[in-house]
Image (tube, rainbow, N blue to C red):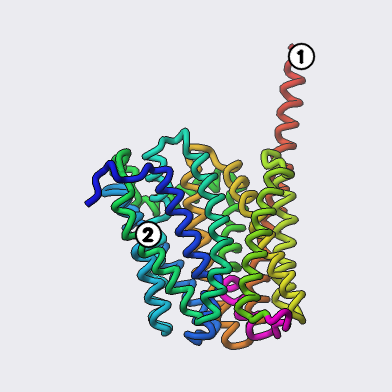
Amino acid sequence: MYSMSRKLNAYTVYLLMVGIDSLARSIMFTLNLIYQAEVVHLNPLQLVLVGTTLETACFLAQIPTGVIADVYSRRLSVVIGYILTGVGFLLEGLVPTFAAVLLGNILWGIGATCIDGAQEAWVVDEVGEEHAGRIFTRGSQIGQIMGLIGIPISVALGSLRLNVPVVTGALLITLLGLVLPFIMREDGFTPTPREERNSWQSMGRQLTDARHMVSLKPMLVSIFGATLFMGLSSEGFDRLNQVHFLQDFTFPILWGLTPVIWFGIISAVSSLLGIATTELVNRRLNLNHAPSLLRALTIINALLLISMLSFALAGNFYLALIAVWGVGVMRTASRPLYNTWVTQNSDSRVRATIFSATGMIDAIGQIGGGPAVGYIGERVSIRAALTAASLLLSPILFFFLRSFRLLQRNEDSSMKSSSVDTIVELER
């Protein structure tokens, strides 16, 4: 057993975890859906049911995994999470059956829930809140770089056999989980008080609190409504877009590029466009100005809807390629704006509850919308399923327009109140 002196500092361990995890996931996920469709021979409904199973496992595992992180040890929670994730993907990569893929995703869902939140909470406990922002920013940068490095590795391994990237990434994550107990210190952990721990009762209270806050702050209706339709739309689209390329298009014969290499190119360009988009949003948009924020959200999500429909209905490969990149760019641009929108419309004392509620609503949307879209893909066509997934996103435009009206009403009320105060002052 290693002594405490042999353990690395928390900053180094956190960056190591983020880097290896991002590399392994990139290796696994670049061609994972192609493996499921081409080797495991999953049909459209089964592909979506795999994602639905994952979301359900994550949803149901929130409470028991939260107890491990809150009561016993955040380090233990992270270690268990990585080992379960690695074993889940090993099962999927080594046993090409629908049942094995489902079980593997259940293990991944539980593992991901063990890691989610516990990893960040652990490093903050160890280094202090004052250093958290710098660490998370550097971790995000390393994650993006390692994700890009993983794409060509995945393509090279996938050119041998499509299950090799899955098994390789799974072994990396499993190895990470086995090594962490020997290098990961935990000096700053204190058990969370009983009344602050996650429980089924606390989840129910969060939903009740969210419902109560909606009556006090009407803007939350728009936030929750938009979140629901994002969830309803996303699962089916994400699970079927690569199959759409395989079944409905002929890949161009350029420089001897195989479909596996094409998918690597698509992923790499999507990642680069995502990095550039995030930087552009940070530099160009004034996120503190609510009308500008809502205007940007409306335009970006309208373009997202157009991109999704264009991809579903595209008549040739290059149009589909441009459209799917458009979907990635618009989603990347929308994410920080959406988080800012939620933040601006929630008081600090209930902000965690609001974010938790939006997470649950998104999961409910994915669990509800995914199978319906998959059923359409199985019974009608992939194009029809992707079109349905795209149209499920359209109601969010109504919620953004509703938010504009609420914002205008609040501004008018503020102006009237200001005018009354001015008149009163003059009369004095």
Q: Which one is nearer the viewer's eye here, 191 or 232?
A: 191
Q: Which one is nearer the viewer's eye here, 356 or 19?
A: 19
Q: Which mark is residue 176?
A: 2
- The residue shown at (65%, 70%) is 265
Q: How many marks?
A: 2
Q: Is residue 263 magenta?
A: no
- Rendered view: 373 above or below 4: below
Nearer mark to the viewer, of 2 and 1: 2
- Rendered view: 146 above or below 194: below
List x then y, in percent, for residue 120. 43, 47
List x then y, in percent, for residue 296. 73, 50
Bin the neighbour count of mark 2 within 10 Å (Cα to Cα): few under 14, some 14-19, many 20 and up: some
List x then y, in percent, for residue 172. 41, 65
- Callout 2 secondary element: helix
Q: Amino acid at mark 2?
A: Leu
- Rendered view: 33 above or below 180: below
Q: Amino acid at mark 1?
A: Glu
- The residue shown at (75%, 56%) is 299
Examine the image and state in which quarter residue 128 appears.
top left
- The residue shown at (45%, 58%) is 20
- Rendered view: 425 above or below 160: above
Task: Report the magenta residues as a range.
Answer: 236-256
**Side of 304 relative to 87 (left or right):** right
Q: Which mark is residue 427?
A: 1
Q: Earlier in the sequence, mark 2 or mark 1?
A: 2
**Side of 54 relative to 374 (left or right):** left
Q: Are marks 2 and 1 in contact (CB under 8 Å)?
A: no
